[in-house]
Image: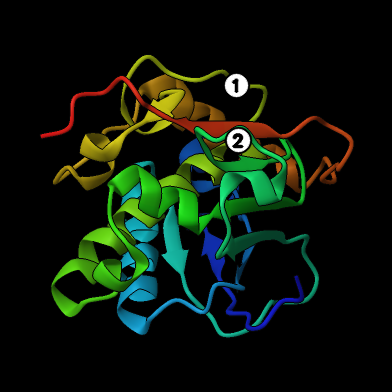
Amino acid sequence: MAPRAAAYLVLVLAGRAAGAETDEAATARLIWRDVARLPARVSASAQEEVARLYAVAGVRAAWVERNEPGAPALSVFIMDVESAWLRLPKDVMGVSRPRGDAAWIAYAAVLRTLKITRKQAHRAHEAAAVGRALGRVIAHEVVHALALPHTHAEHGLMRARLGRAALLADAIEWDDPSRRALLDGLISAAAVPPTTSAAPAALAQDTDEAVP
C-alpha cells in the first residue's frame, strides 16, 4: 500500500539553560504521516489531544508542515487498515519499536474499538471525539517508541489495554513512572541514536472493558 499523503509534526520539549530541571531539557521530533487521508477535523482533534496529553507530561508540542534538519525524527504512520494488515492480533490498534524510529496506527482498528463506522466517524458531530481517541492511541505508541525501557501501567494512558470508554472519556491520566520514562527517554535520545532492531510494542484494545 503506497503512502498517499503525509503531514509533519515536531514535538519539542521546552529547554532552558544548563542546569534546568530534567523535565525541560530535551527535544524530540516526530513526523506524522497521514496515509489514511483523515478529514481535517479528525486530524486536528488528534493533534490537539497529543499536544494536550504531552503538555500534562511537561512536553510542548509544536506542529509544523515539514521535518526539521539536524535531528533524528520518529515517523508516525496513520494507516487506514485493520490490525491484520500490520500483522498484528485483532485486538491491537497500534505498534511501535521501543527506542526506535517509527510507530504505526491501524485506524480501522481504532474505529472498530469505538464501535463506529468510518462514515459515522467522519460526521461533523463525531469527528472531534474520534480524533481525540486517535490522539490517545498515538500518544501511547509514541511513549513506547521514545521512552527508556518501560512497561505498561495499571491505569491511565499507558495501560496495556485501552477500550472505548477510556478512548472517549473526557480526560485520561498519566501515571508518574510512564511520564518520567518518556521525559528521561527524550533527554537521552540525543546521545543514543534510535534503533530499529527491537521488537515492536503493541497497544491492545480492552475487549473486557464495560462500554457505557
The amino acid on which the numbered mark 1 sits, given as a three-letter code, is His
Estimate how packed mark 1 is, as few (under 14), some (14 to 19) or many (20 or more) residues with alpha carbons within 10 Å: some
Residue behind mark 1: 150
Residue behind mark 2: 144
Between 97 and 209, the one lying in front of the other is 209
Identify the residue shown where x is 83% and y is 40%: 192
The image quarter containing residue 166 is top left
Quadrant the C terminus occupies:
top left
The amino acid on which the numbered mark 2 sits, given as a three-letter code, is His
The percent position of residue 55, horizontal first and vertical second, equals 34, 52
Between 202 and 21, the one lying in front of the other is 202
Could one spot residue 67 in this view of the protein?
yes
Residue 131, compared with residue 112, is above or below; it is below
The image quarter containing residue 8 is bottom right
Q: CA–CA distance between discs 2 and 1? A: 7 Å
The image quarter containing residue 161 is top left
SS for tag 1? loop
Identify the residue shown where x is 43% and y is 18%: 153
The percent position of residue 44, horizontal first and vertical second, equals 34, 74
Identify the residue shown where x is 21% and y is 46%: 168
SS for tag 2? helix
- In the image, which disc is placed on residue 192? none
Is 156 left or right of 103, judged from the image as shown? Answer: left
Residue 21, compared with residue 110, is above or below; it is above
